[in-house]
Image (tube, rainbow, N blue to C red):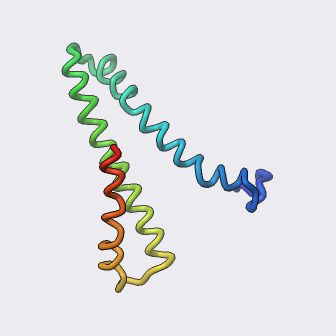
Amino acid sequence: MLAAGGFDSHSAAFDLVVDYLPLTLQLGLLALVPVIVQFTATFLEGSKSLVEVQKIIYQRYFFFQMVNVFVTIGTVSIFTFISDYSAADIPSLLVDSFPRIGGYFIGT
């Protein structure tokens, strides 16, 4: 699709779009989730107190983060597994992969 749009697959612009655009969109969505949840809790659901609105924000943002983490880990794992490994490699992959994601949980 990018090649049809005029991007050369060996150019720096192609690498920039392929490597950083999805990450930037994902982080932008993560930044907008609390704002969207606050809007819906205040105006659409009619929550009156600030404590109630904050509780709703924290609960929904936590669930969104958990889904985001599991979907990201799951899709990366599945695509890596399909392309590179066999079923006999699953235990060693799990042992190697789970400690690597610890930095994400420490950072958030």
Q: Quadrant of residue 89?
A: bottom left
Q: Relative to 77, say whether 88 is above or below.
A: below
Viewport quadrant of the N terminus: bottom right
Q: Relative to 87, say whether 19 is above or below.
A: above
Q: Residue at x 36, y 30 (%)?
A: 34
Q: Residue at x 28, y 43 (%)?
A: 63
Q: Quadrant of residue 90?
A: bottom left
Q: Along the horizontal axis of the image, is 18 left or right of 41?
A: right
Viewport quadrant of the C terminus: top left
Q: Nearer the viewer, residue 64 or 43?
A: 64
Q: Nearer the viewer, residue 79 or 43?
A: 79
Residue 7 placed where, x, y %?
Answer: 77, 54
Q: Along the horizontal axis of the image, is 22 left or right of 106?
A: right
Q: Relative to 37, say whether 72 is above or below.
A: below
Q: Along the horizontal axis of the image, is 14 left or right of 93?
A: right
Q: Nearer the viewer, residue 89 or 87?
A: 89
Residue 17 placed where, x, y %?
Answer: 65, 50
